[in-house]
Each structure stands twice: as C-alpha cells, then as structure tokens.
Image: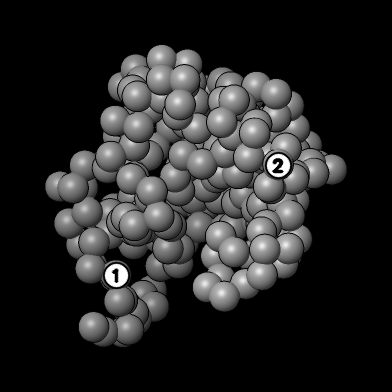
Amino acid sequence: MSFQLPEPQPNQAYVEVSALEAGIITMPLMIVIQGAGPTDTSVIPSLAFSIRHKQSGEHLMFDLGVRRDTEALAPKTQWLIENHMPVQVPQTVEESLKKGGLNPDEVQTVILSHLHFDHVGRPESFTNAKFVVGPGARELLEKGFPGNPESDILTSTTPLDEKRSRFLTDEDFNVSIGPFPRAHDYFGDGSMYVVDADGHLAGDVVVFVV
C-alpha cells in the first residue's frame, strides 16, 4: 500500500471546503469501542461539508447531518434516538448554509457518505440538487421505510429517479489515489475523489479533496 499522493501541478484544480454544524449526538461508546461500559457516552458533532469546485463554481454538499424534525424518521430510528442515542440540533445544515450566504436550493449536488439518519439530514430541502450515493445504496432505499416497516432507512432519502440521483457503480471506481485503491475522479481534474469505503453500510463512500 502506497501513501504517496500526486505532486502539485501548475494550475492545479482544487475545491474549497467548509465544515458546517449539523447536529449533536450523545453516542453510547459500546457501539464504537470494545470494552466500553454500558453507561459510557461521548457527545460528538454531526458534521456536513460545503464544497465549492473552484474551476466550475459548482456548489456541493457532502452529508447533511441530522434533521431537527426527528419525528419524520423511520420508527426504528425514532426508537434508537429516544432510548439510546439522543440528538440535539441547535443549528441545522440549512441554517448553517444560510449563515454563510448560500441557500439550500443553490446547492447543485449532494453526496451522501451513507444512508444512516445522522448523515442524510433533510434532503427535501435541497430541491435543485442531484444526489450521489455509493454502490448498494439503491437496494437499501428500495427496501426502506415505509415499504419495509422494520427498516431504519427512509426510501425518500434519495430520489430513485435517475434524473435526480446518480447511483455509483463498481465500474465508477476506476482510479487509485494514495492508499485508496478504489476511487472516482469526480470532476475529472484531480480536485476531488469519491472513495469506496464499503464496510460500515452498503454504499459507504468518503470524499478525498485537493
């Protein structure tokens, strides 16, 4: 495995990134740390990221944090929040964007790392955005709530219409970057890569930026 990254180039394409407040979660540590006690918790931020491609001016979001109206989530997720993982949303991602001078309807693309509630926010706020999700996400959406009452994934998280969504396939991950063997050069100019990070949930991706 190589950790060597490409050398900077003259007139290198790049993106600008801003981390946005998008909710707070009280996380039971037993979920993430082996040996943690049943009452051990940690308060962690749920972050979203505003990305602007400098060359084209395109505005993107990577993840949308937690929605304030948690009653709109699947019942299984509501139970998790009420009994194990309380959330607070002092400032939604929409409010964070507006403080920076950008309205949600100006965002052109939303890339979701995966479909858990603390990453997908309130996607219906982004009325003009195309949604991008990783391999395997479509099947989770098609089998989501309300069609499947036991699912914690909302089918409405991402439009199933391919005019509004891009469902990445294994074939899209055709380049490597540093230690990541499966990446997709999103703009084709080396400024931002969507990296296959399957393992946490089907369709899991991360974004690597220059």
Q: Is residue 146 above or below residue 134?
A: above
Quarter of the picture holding the C terminus: bottom left
Query: What numbered label is drawn on residue 180?
Result: 1
Quadrant of the image occupied by residue 130: top left
Q: Is residue 17 visible?
A: yes
- Amino acid at circle 2: Asn
Residue at 18% from the left image edge and 47% from the top image edge: 170
Mark 2 = which residue?
83
Q: Is residue 39 above or below residue 131?
A: below
Q: In the drawing, does residue 62 fall left or right of residue 137?
A: right
Residue 62 point in image, percent of width and height: 52, 47
How many numbered circles are shown?
A: 2
Residue 100 point in image, percent of width and height: 76, 45
Residue at 40% from the left image edge and 67% from the top image edge: 12
Precedes in sequence: disc 2 or disc 1: 2
Q: CB under 8 Å between callouts 2 and 1?
A: no
Residue 122 point in image, percent of width and height: 62, 29
41 vs 17, nearest the viewer: 41
Comparing labels 2 and 1, the label whose residue is closer to the camera: 2
Question: How far apart are labels 2 and 1 at the CA level?
Answer: 37 Å
- Amino acid at circle 1: Phe
